Image (cartoon, helix red, strand yellow):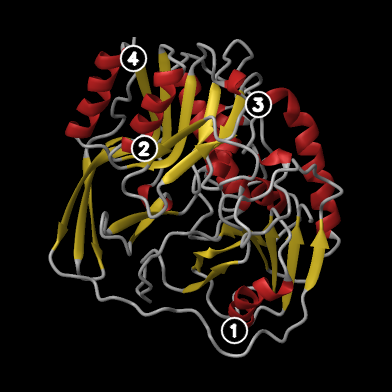
Amino acid sequence: MKKSQTSTLLKKTHSYTILDALNVDIEVTANPYLLPIEELFTMAARINKKRSFLFVSKVLGKHIPITPQKGLLTAALLGMRYAELIKGLNPIEKERLLTLYSEDKPSYQSTSFIPKQVNPVVIGFAETATSLGHAFFDCFINAEYFHTTREELKDLMPSVTFEEEHSHATSHRCYIPIEMIKNDREIILVDDEMTTGKTALNIIQSIHTQYPRKDYTVVSILDWRSGEHIKEFEKLENTLGITINVVSLLAGKVQVNQFQNIPEQSDRRDHSLPAKQPIEVISLSSFFKNTGFSALLSHQSQAPFIEETGRFGISSDRNTSLHQQISDAAKYLSEKRNGVKTLCLGTGEFMYIPMKLAAEMGKNILFQSTTRSPIHIAKVNGYGARYGINFLNPEDESVAHFVYNIPPNEYDEVFIFFEREVTNEKLKPLLKQLENLQIKSIKVVFFSQS
């Protein structure tokens, strides 16, 4: 029987006005752990004709800097909710996790508490939920995980592809051994937020066409599907003869009213002189293993991707050694620190390992990541993107990347994590932007080299 969330509190409506142009009303219908809604997200205006607004997560580590342990704990709470709601378990970790989650600076390391008889395949969505999906997978004693990717690889074809209609980068690819999904195991799809649920339905249909099974679960921090969208899930269940469970930390109904256009913003890239500040380049290639697979296009970095991200699939029996690799690398990086307040900056899809490293590198560290998502910048209290820089992605100069919410003089040190080595020339636009933010110590960390 399909499991669904029921409300644990009286319905309450929250209203948000975005840049005097959009009004968003949210009626909360389920909040099983009674998490304060204002601690989960704020809102911003998207530069996207297909969807004009964005829920800006305060716990994901993408657009807003977070303590890295908060991101790991958010995934653990999703794992807890899945265990309770879908599997009928009562993990003893629950009270400890909720207590840690309420702390400003929690001390937390990933914990596996979902027993080995639960043996799903977990899939994280690129680019935003690669870290959330991997950290959710960490909750299982016996599971497998991979994340979708926007990358096209040389000498390797994806096993599954699907499209995401509302996104600015629509093609998702899955580079995994066929055996990982050629079975009848439950598939769990992990995303940070569902507005329509179309992305989840697309990948379920893509997988089911080739590798059918009975049970799917969709996990997200936020679930804003309307009654109509929920019926689309039910329709697909009936059509395919499957069960689609849904798990979230907060669910509700969203109503949007746009009463005027949002003014366009000009290119915020800095085209002035290149950065002069010296940087320190750090290689972690001895701690991680490269796959031998590189990008298809010649203008991208040709250094190989690494094995440990989950892009190519990873199983729970690998977790102990992977976490030890990360701990060893974190110790090495902590000895390189010379700042008081440090930002660890992941890049694009490369979030999980940087977040885990940041969680073990010492005190006074915040984590976030670059993103492909273009957002309107406005210095308005409570708005989701008060500051912003943009630059061409050093690993793929055909793609613009953005970093939000770094005020000038906020950090005295930054570690920038790139999965693949890139040249100094390609780094210059990003380094110039960071130099303009008065960050005195800039360290660039590579995980594989050409």
Q: Nearer the viewer, mark 2 or mark 1?
A: 2
Identify the amino acid type marked 4.
Lys
Identify the amino acid type marked 2.
Thr
Q: How far apart are marks 1 and 4 (CA)?
A: 53 Å
Please give left or right for residue 446 compared with residue 9 in the image. Answer: right
Q: Distance between the residues labelled 3 and 1?
A: 42 Å
At 61% from the left and 62% from the top, the residue drawn is 299
Check disc 1 and report the residue beneath it.
Answer: 436
SS at badge 4: loop
Question: Is the C-beta separation of discs 2 and 3 under 8 Å?
Answer: no
At 72% from the left and 44% from the top, the residue drawn is 306
Identify the amino acid type marked 3.
Ser
Check disc 4 and report the residue beneath it.
Answer: 2
Check disc 3 and report the residue beneath it.
Answer: 112
Q: How crowded is mark 2: few (under 14 residues within 10 Å), some or many (20 or more)?
A: many
Give the image location of residue 399, x and y in percent.
50, 63
Quarter holding residue 416? bottom right
SS at badge 2: helix
- Pick whichever of labels 1 and 4 is earlier in the sequence: 4
Q: Distance between the residues labelled 2 and 3?
A: 28 Å
| Viewer-closest of 442 and 59 | 442
Give the image location of residue 179, x and y in percent.
61, 18
Check disc 2 and report the residue beneath it.
Answer: 199
